[in-house]
Amino acid sequence: MGSLGALLKHPDEFYHLLKLKMAMKHAEKQIPPQPHWRFCYTMLQKVSHSFDLVIQQLGTEVRDAVCIFYLVLRALDTIEDDTGIPTDIKVPTLIAFHRHLYDREWHFSCGTKDCKVLMDQFLHVQTAFAELGKSFQEAIDESTKRMGAGMAKFICKEVETIDDYDEYCHIVAGVVGLGLSKLFHASQLEDLAPDYLSNTMGLFLQKSSIIRDYLEDINEIPKCRAFWPHEIWDKYVIKLEDLKYEENSVKAVQCLNDMVTNSLIHVEDCFKYMCALRDPAIFRFCAIPQIMAVGTLAMCYNNIEVFRGVVKMRRGLTAKVIDRTRTLSDVYGAFFDFSCMLQSKVDKNDPNATETLSRLEAIQKICRESGYLSNRKSYLVRSESTYKSVVVVLLFILISVLLAYLFANQQVSGTEAHNHKY
């Protein structure tokens, strides 16, 4: 549930962490009994971290389709990510992957940890896929086919230009956005969103992940994975891996800020997509990852730790986002908060400062003009409230310990009386 240090610094998140823990326990009890569905939902919990909760709260029909879609794409991604697979095997496997959804004799072992389990027991996913409605199957098949072919293309192609970068993000995430929109439409819960908006939702998520995961990707063994476009990093260093060396810290942060600024261009279209959604559960499913993405960008911006270790949102803040995100007011409020946080970190000597500030001001203007900000609760708590919040948390812990002690004593007393009676 997060470290004690993080809780003491951000005690307002304790309540949301507790609710998240309870929700996870509840989700475990809701796993279907059939072996193949039990495998799928159990695996979803393992490979998607807390996000499986957002999938679980969808309506039954669309929930099952999204669960299988997620696992199919996770399997495809596992093949792409495994740098130990020779190119002459990986490329045709990615291209043909969509056909294997119907072939229960097919097997391809790769990946590590939970993803290896997913690949080794992929038959369960195929069995569940076969039980989905035809329109759901077609949407998943089409998206998987497009993604596999696109991934195969970039196995043999470097991300050179910003156009290449946008194309790669389209392949691995924009296509997911298109597929999800088709699943929502097939469920008859939503109108079919325009392709460019569905694509944008994926691009924004993928770019935040690529920025956050620089060090993990560049240190991949046996071969590094490079997704930052040459057109951007070439302005700062000779080789992409040079960004991780301490002597290049200033240039590395400037390059990082350039990457973050590039991603901000997608925010307005993401707002348009979310504003058109009607179903509350689908809205939450779409909105929570978007807020996580802008929060991640705010954490990464101007932060040298991106090149030293892992930079991500605190578990407590993640729990708060999952718990609070329910309406457009929450979305606009979160984007406003995180854009302000990012804005406060802009160094006016940064070569991209003017462009960064311009994009942030445009985001903040949209949020203000939405008319929703007056109804929001802040996702970021100001430091002056920390002391009072710490006291509240400590009192809560003290009372919990006291109640547990009294309850234990009560049980002991009851046991003694019972034994005496007999």
Image (cartoon, rainbow, N blue to C red):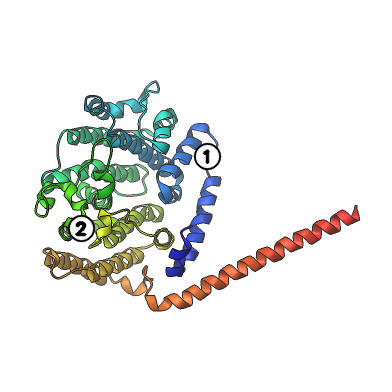
Label 2 secondary element:
helix
Q: Is residue 155 visible?
A: yes
Q: Give the residue at mark 2.
A: 260
Position of residue 1 measured from the top left corner of the image (x, y, whole percent): 48, 57
Between 257 and 49, the one lying in front of the other is 257
Position of residue 340 measured from the top left corner of the image (x, y, whole percent): 26, 70
Position of residue 309 measured from the top left corner of the image (x, y, whole percent): 31, 53
Residue 161's disc is none
Residue in view at x 60 percent, y 70 percent:
398
Q: Is residue 401 above or below residue 76?
A: below
Q: In terms of sequence position, does the residue under pointer 1 or pointer 2 come before the other?
A: 1
Q: Is residue 38 left or right of residue 142?
A: right
Q: Could you tell me the amino acid type at mark 1?
A: Pro
Is the residue marked by circle 1 packed among few (<14), some (14-19), or many (20+) residues within 10 Å? some
Residue in view at x 43 percent, y 51 percent:
50
Is the residue marked by circle 2 packed among few (<14), some (14-19), or many (20+) residues within 10 Å? many
Between 221 and 95, the one lying in front of the other is 221
Q: Is residue 28 above or below residue 38?
A: below
* Discs 1/2, front: 2
Q: Give the residue at mark 1.
A: 32
